[in-house]
Image (cartoon, rainbow, N blue to C red):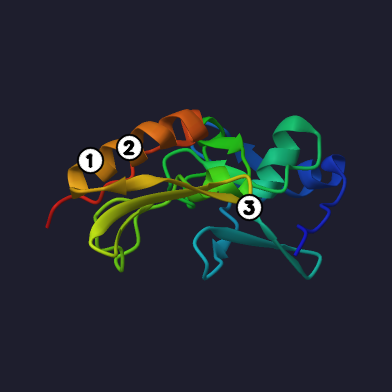
Amino acid sequence: MPAKILPPVEYLRECYRYSPEIGVLTDPDGNPVGSPNGLGGTQVMLDYVNYKAHRIIWKMMTGEEPPATIDHRDGNPFNNRWSNLRAGSRTKDKMNVRLLDKNTSGCRGVYFDAGRWRVRLSADGIRRSFGRFATREEAIAVAEATARKLFGEFYRGFRRAPH
């Protein structure tokens, strides 16, 4: 579903103040606005319509409609400091989220298949296979090296910390 078009930047600046260093939207009196949106992140209601706070912030800072995807560099969707926000894509944004608990290899893109460890990564809507390996460690090394090349600054590390 495409993102909602935001009101004009002049109107947003009448309704809100934003501190780039702190990352908080406030009303003109300095009271923080917004609430958790249930999906991770903050939503703000304006004229009976909910908007994602980071999208309002983007438009207030740049004067332009935000890109379809805004990535939080540190992976924390509640950290709306300007230095933490960057234009992304769905693929790149997925590289900047924590590893799912159901992952059994401890590394994104690595799984056990037919007696070998397999590496498969998706980028720009295309799923690619990067080989099968005898050991989990070999597969993880290939997955991480490949991800660094594919995702650049969006690569945040694929491994889960050992329990």
SS under mark 2: helix
- The image quarter containing residue 59 is top right
- The image's mark for residue 138 is 1
Looking at the picture, which amino acid does disc 1 mark?
A: Glu
Which one is nearer the viewer's eye here, 140 or 37?
Answer: 140
Front position among marks 3 and 1: 1
Please provide percent x and percent y for residue 163: 12, 57
Image coords of residue 109 (percent x, y):
38, 52
Above-or-below relation of 122 to 34: above
User: What residue sits 85% from the left and 51% below the top?
Assistant: 7
Residue hosting label 2: 142
x and y, in percent, of residue 32 in the image: 56, 53
What is the secondary structure assignment of the residue under circle 3?
helix
How dense is the environment of label 2, judged by Cα within 10 Å: few (below 14), some, or many (20 and up)? some
* Dot 1 and dot 2 residues touching (CB under 8 Å): yes
**Which one is earlier in the sequence, the residue at label 3 or at label 2?**
3
